[in-house]
Image (cartoon, helix red, strand yellow):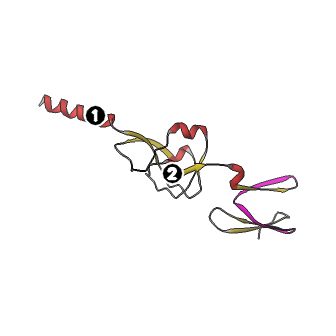
């Protein structure tokens, strides 16, 4: 009986020897959403998908990342699922005199009266130069 218990104990410890440390999402992450460390947790798994290169915790301390696709809760975070976050590339800054407003999206059209912006979810927003919305 003692041999069986010791064999079982040794086998449990050996499972963790061959495991891979990965980052798993704790909640859903939308497309092009900034990935914060509060939505991630570190876990050990035995194997990952063939083309998945797991991200490391040290990568998230150095830079910010955004999601390239929708990520479900419990998904292993791979390098192909994220891209570097460039604040100037993904946002538009409006200067209304003393007030500056920053909106995520890209400028589609601009004239004397208003500016049209395509948001990250695909909707188009029209903002007038005097500060009011459509």
Specify the label residue 80 is tagged with: 2
Numbered disc 2: secondary structure: helix
Q: Are marks 1 and 2 in contact (CB under 8 Å)?
A: no
Quick check: 61 above or below 73? above
Location of the N terminus by quadrant is top left
Residue 43 is left or right of residue 103, and the answer is left
Residue 104 appears at what percent x and percent y?
69, 57
Q: Quadrant of residue 130?
A: bottom right
Foreground pick, 10 / 81: 81
Residue 94 appears at what percent x and percent y?
80, 57
Residue 38 appears at what percent x and percent y?
54, 45
Q: Quadrant of residue 60?
A: top right
Location of the C terminus by quadrant is bottom right
Residue 82 falls within the magenta-colored stretch: no
The residues tagged by marks 1 and 2 sit, at their Cα atoms, a distance apart of: 30 Å
Q: In the orientation shown, which residue stands out farthest toward the bottom?
A: 134
At 38% from the left and 47% from the top, the residue drawn is 48
The magenta region covers 97-116
Crowdedness near tag 1: few (<14), some (14–19) or many (≥20) residues, C-alpha within 10 Å: few
Q: For mark 1, what is the residue?
A: 14
């Amino acid at each position: 009986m003692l041999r069986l218990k010791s064999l079982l104990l040794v086998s449990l410890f050996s499972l963790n020897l061959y495991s891979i440390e990965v980052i798993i999402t704790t909640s859903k992450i939308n497309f092009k959403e900034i990935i914060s460390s509060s939505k991630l947790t570190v876990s050990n798994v035995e194997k990952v998908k063939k083309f998945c290169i797991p991200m490391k915790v040290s990568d998230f301390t150095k830079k910010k990342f955004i999601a390239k696709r929708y990520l479900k809760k419990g998904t292993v975070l791979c390098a192909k699922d994220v891209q570097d976050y460039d604040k100037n590339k993904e946002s538009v800054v409006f200067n209304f005199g003393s007030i500056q407003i920053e909106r995520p999206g890209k400028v589609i059209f601009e004239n004397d009266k208003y500016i049209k912006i395509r948001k990250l979810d695909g909707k188009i927003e029209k903002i007038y130069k005097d500060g009011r919305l459509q």
